[in-house]
Amino acid sequence: MIMAKKYTLVLVFILFIFASCINTNINDKPPQPSTFTATLPLPLTASATKTPSPTLPPTAFPTLSTLPPEDTYMMLLGMLNHDEACELPCWLDITPGISTHTEAYQKWASFLTPFLDTVNSRKFYYDFKYNQNDEDFFITTRYYLQPTKDTIDSMYITTQTLKTAENGNRVEVFNSPIYKKILDGYLLSNVLTKYGQPDQILLNMEIIEAGPTSPDYFRIWLLYPELGSIIQYWGIAEVENGIIHGCPSDTFVSLWLFQPNNAEKYKEMLVESMSEPYSAYFKPTEDALGMTQEEFFNKFRETDSGCLESSLDIWLQQ
């Protein structure tokens, strides 16, 4: 994993290029091949500049009655899959840059569990948990408020399903039917079909010094600056005869949501989402899979059953 300081300048330059290329009409543009043509090492020391914010004044909210588990499940299912008015970057009827903290509480507190961050008083968490067939399905939504307003600035959503294995450990269930039912609208093929070809499609593999020939996970990144959205799919990577295999149909989705066409916020979200410690390697589809971005888009918007194959060697090059 290359962590040399010289790549910091490369990261900053590329992020500015990303931010400057925002197109304001994604639905009308024809599919374009990716212009990202080089491996992007992201230094773990990279950090976005944040404006200092005052402490959020105490706000009195009425105590809302909570719904029974089955009712919360049905409410979440309906909001995620049947609310046509809520399109990216909207999440559960809340939109960054428009919706307020007060509105989020009033809409979510009856079926999600709210938490205030004890360190940053302008950061909030809402959790959802649902159990079915000995599997625990989780969604965690984190959002920040704007520096001096009650308006939500950005959101980060993580999802997964876990179960208890025979040895007592908790393990991920990437092919969970309940997961796919709840998050049907956010499966890779459905996102590509609904929102069109992203500005960029990137892949990365978890390559660690302790086991460089056996990556644990693969990740697919869809970058939609016009929609204020960065979407990541991650799942198990298996290696056989020097080829990494991974199936997008068996993945968990994470989302970073912010105001559309906001170049500064897009740059900040790129740094936050891509500077995680599991890997410093990001490759376009041409390098990772031998297919153009348009070919990837056309293939995976039509089916959830196709899998990826990538040579292990290209991820070990330094």
Image (cartoon, rainbow, N blue to C red):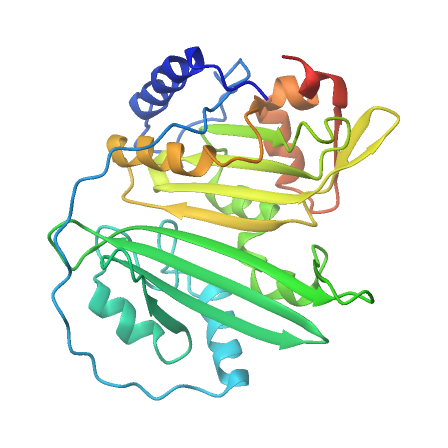
Position of the C terminus, as image quadrant, is top right
Q: Is residue 13 visible?
A: yes
Q: Would you say 96 lies left or right of 207 here?
A: left
Residue at position x 21%, y 84% in the image:
62
Q: Nearer the viewer, residue 228 or 244?
A: 244
In the rendered image, the residue lying farthest to the right is: 241
Whether 65 is drawn above or below 131: the answer is below
Residue at position x 49%, y 47% in the image:
194
Q: Position of residue 6 (x, y in %)?
A: 42, 10
Position of the N terminus, as image quadrant, is top right
Q: Nearer the viewer, residue 147 or 22?
A: 147
Which image quarter: residue 182? bottom right
Residue at position x 15%, y 61% in the image:
56
Whether 181 is drawn above or below 248: the answer is below
Whether 88 is drawn above or below 267: the answer is below
Q: Position of residue 69 (x, y in %)?
A: 52, 83
